[in-house]
Amino acid sequence: MINTILIADDHCLSRIALNLLVKDIFGNTCVVDFAENGKQVLDKLSSCQFNMLITDLNMPETDCMGMLCKALELVRDLKILVVSVYNESIYAQRCLKVGAYGYLCKNESDDDFKNAIRTVGAGRRYYSFRQNDLFINSFLDGFSDNPFHKLSAREFEVALLLLKGHGAIEVANVMDISPSTASTYRARVFNKLKVKNLMELNHLSSRFGIADDFA
């Protein structure tokens, strides 16, 4: 079976590097295409047949996890490997919960990248050693002291956009929802996190390492 792989990243060098790794693993048994933003990802998944998506999490014209959900709606059995600079202790489990096959930090070695690409390409889930520990501890504890884990996928997405400085209208545009719905989500985020304003949200995110991803 020929692997048809879509590589999505807004940085040209990252796309080139991922393509070299993919070609090294699959050789002539794969066909590779590229996307530079979230809109291109969804457009190409709509118009062409891909069985694997290797994507950055933070790209233009996308709402991160929302794009993963939409991608899986377009291609139900799509094998997704997320490659990101974001803290895996915060983002890996969320990506896997919405349907991704694996999550890999961009600072990992070439061997780790090849292992992840090969594993996901074969239709198996990929977990790093650190993620295994995180998931086991989370299962054993049954809860987390990180309040951001209380947020639903959509609420978490809104929180990320607010942390990037987006207002209600910008959140609505990015997530393709009405401004009133965006405001409702914002209120839910504040309520669940027990914060009263953006300043408190930023302080809380810094405490749990989320704001570091936007530095």
Image (cartoon, grey):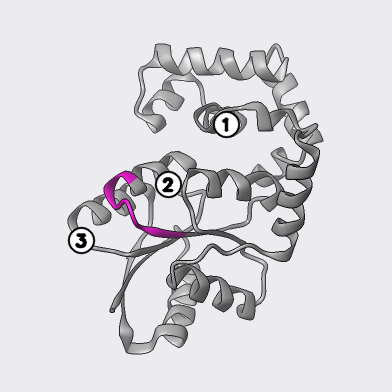
Relative to residue 195, is residue 129 depicted above or below? Answer: below
Nearer-N-terminus badge (3/1): 3
Q: Mark 3 is on which residue type?
A: Cys
Between 207 and 45, which is closer to the camera in this rendering? 45
- Residue 154: x and y in percent read 49, 29
Q: Secondary structure at mark 3?
A: loop
Q: Which mark is residue 198?
A: none
Measuring 70% from the left and 39% from the top, which residue is drawn there? Answer: 210
- How many numbered discs, if any? 3
- Residue 181: x and y in percent read 42, 15
Residue under label 3, please give it.
Answer: 48
Residue under label 1, please give it.
Answer: 156
Give the image quarter of residue 85. Answer: bottom right
Horizontal relation, residue 206 to residue 93: left or right = right
Residue under label 2, please give it.
Answer: 68
Q: Secondary structure at mark 2?
A: helix
Spatial separation of the CA atoms under disc 3 and disc 1: 30 Å
For label 1, count other residues whose C-alpha is less than 10 Å away and answer few (under 14), some (14-19) or many (20+).
some
Spatial separation of the CA atoms under disc 2 and disc 1: 14 Å
**Residue 64 appears in view:** no
Measuring 49% from the left and 71% from the top, which residue is drawn there? Answer: 13
Image quadrant containing the C terminus: top right
Magenta part of the chain: 73-80
Horizontal relation, residue 124 to residue 35: left or right = right
Q: Mark 1 is on which residue type?
A: Phe
Please check the rendered image and state whether residue 74 is part of the magenta-colored stretch, yes or no: yes
